[in-house]
Image (cartoon, rainbow, N blue to C red):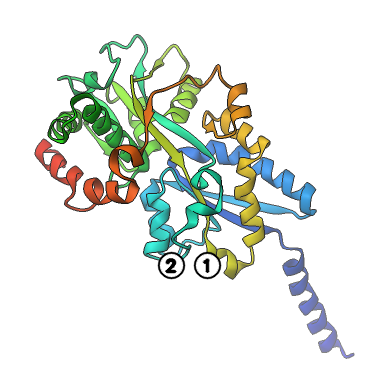
Amino acid sequence: MNRRQTLLAALALALALPAAAQTQALLNVSYDVTREFYKDYNAAFIRHWKQKSGKEIAVNQSHGGSSKQAGSVVAGLEADVITMNQANDIDILAERGGLIPADWQKRLPNNSAPYTSTTVFLVRKGNPKGIKDWDDLVRPGVGVIIPNPKTSGNGRYSYLAAWGYALRKTGSETQAREFVTKFLKNIPVLDTGGRGATTTFAQRGIGDVLLTFENEVFLLVKELGATNVEVVYPSVSILAENPVSVVDKVVDRKGTRATAQAYLEYLYSDEGQEVAARHFFRPRNAKVLAKHAGTFRKLDVFTVDEVFGGWKKAQAVHFADGGEFDRIFALTGKK
């Protein structure tokens, strides 16, 4: 072998070795307020996968407003898995992108939602506005902070929780609409995602009450200290189910299906459920939930299916362009 052939062989070997030794990487595209949870969960799964398969993997994260994140996957963001806070933002991968099957929710237990949360209130220490329940959020002079329901699943849950409360109380869609109109009038700013709304309330000092997921509220109390904020549980709220799915076309193209599937299945394991509980998501596993009974109080909650006929109908009626949210928001005079 001459010198040129030797160099070419060495170059080919150098190029081949990294490919053979390359660590497989997954991308989890998720919503705004799961950063800390998935950071810890990823570390747990990487350890588990190394012990089970002997293989090294890496898991990358992408976070933002849920609808924007889902839209990015449809537009080409190479997500191996998608982990959202509502089924509607995963359905569009089937409807618009053909990336997953339409019956994706049947592939894992609990309609592919391994943990849940709910919408609660965070107020400033001492609760100076005396906020105790939904009716207090429509009083004049109360500043309410939620993310934009057009771009954020967190915001959609807060909007639907307010509507569902009023509907339960009055039995009238008309009165529920009037209640939500007053509710939206008290919102000074709409951020695109839940973490942005948290920043507006906690760091910018805007508003008297932040509506967000229970898990986010616990983390804020931990971060800001109980001397600055306190949690208020309303009399009734909405069940936030957090579904997950493999993105079939991506994992089949990348050859990551087995790892991606295992990544989601491990969310249902005792360790996965414990990580969820430590980050204040309500685990589906009854045994793990019972261990954390002191953290998660019993709540009166309704589901999107029960009150709104499911996410597809709720999206069409309330959040599609020209829907209830757009019409009501126009009445507030806000932009």
**What is the quadrant of the C terminus in the image?**
top left
Picture layout, residue 254 above or below residue 144: below
Question: Which element carries disc 1, helix, strand or loop?
Answer: helix
**Observer-nearest of 262 and 2:** 262
Picture layout, residue 327 above or below residue 180: below
Question: Which numbered disc, 1 or 2, marks the residue that appears first in the sequence?
Answer: 2
**Observer-nearest of 107 and 20:** 107
Residue at 32% of width from left, 51% of height from top?
Answer: 312
Q: Position of residue 210 (x, y in %)?
A: 33, 26
Residue 318 visible in the current orientation: yes
Please give left or right for residue 47 compared with residue 119 in the image. right
**Observer-nearest of 208 and 163:** 163
Question: Which element carries disc 2, helix, strand or loop?
Answer: loop
Q: Position of residue 318 (x, y in %)?
A: 23, 45
Please give left or right for residue 315 compared with residue 261 in the image. left
Rounded to the nearest angstrom, the CA distance separating label 1 from label 2 is 8 Å
**Residue identified by numbered label 1:** 249
Disc assigned to residue 82? none
Picture layout, residue 305 above or below residue 312: above
Residue at 28% of width from left, 36% of height from top?
Answer: 160
Are the residues flagged by discs 1 and 2 in contact, CB closer than 8 Å? yes
Please give left or right for residue 181 compared with residue 163 in the image. left
Picture layout, residue 302 above or below residue 90: above
Could you tell me the amino acid type at mark 1? Lys
Q: Residues within 10 Å of mark 1 (few under 14, many from 20)?
A: some
Q: How many marks?
A: 2
**Residue identified by numbered label 2:** 98
Q: Position of residue 66 (x, y in %)?
A: 39, 47
Residue 69 visible in the current orientation: no
